[in-house]
Image (cartoon, rainbow, N blue to C red):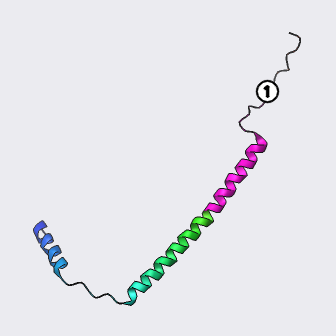
Amino acid sequence: MKREEREAAVRDAMRRAVAPVPPELHADAVRRGDRLLRRRRLVRRVLWLPACAAAVAFAVWAAGAHPWVEPSTRTTPPVTGW
């Protein structure tokens, strides 16, 4: 099929009358969309819970372990009497 033929076919399809839509289709689509939005919102909230718990656990661990402080070396004795 050549480009001109495809364009003509598309023009013919666009000129045709729109197929009738069942009246209950809108209500079903709205119901399904609301259900999807509620499910996404729930999943998002459920996934935020472990993320917040991990942040709190890390903060508690860091407050107790002080990972930013360099550990003392125990390989040499302290120098005294200089």
| Rendering coords of residue 64 (x, y %) | 79, 44
Quadrant (top left, top right, bottom left, bottom right) of the N terminus: bottom left
> In the visual, does 50 lie left or right of 37?
right
Whether 64 is drawn above or below 45: the answer is above
36 or 10: nearer the viewer: 36
| Rendering coords of residue 10 (x, y %) | 17, 74
Q: Is residue 30 magenta?
A: no
Q: Main secondary structure of the magenta part?
A: helix
Q: How many marks?
A: 1
The residue furthest left is 4
Residue located 55% across and 73% down the image = 39
**Which amino acid, mark 1?**
Thr
- Other-residue count near label 1 (Cα within 10 Å), few / some / many at <14 / 14–19 / ≥20: few
Residue located 62% across and 61% down the image = 48
The residue furthest bottom is 23
> In the visual, does 44 lie left or right of 76?
left
58 or 77: nearer the viewer: 58
> In the visual, does 5 lie left or right of 49?
left
Whether 68 is drawn above or below 47: the answer is above
Identify the residue under disc 1: 73
In the image, the segment drawn in magenta is: 48-72
| Element under disc 1 | loop
Locate residue 13: give its quadrant.
bottom left
Whether 34 is drawn above or below 47: the answer is below
| Rendering coords of residue 15 (x, y %) | 16, 79
Residue located 72% across and 52% down the image = 57
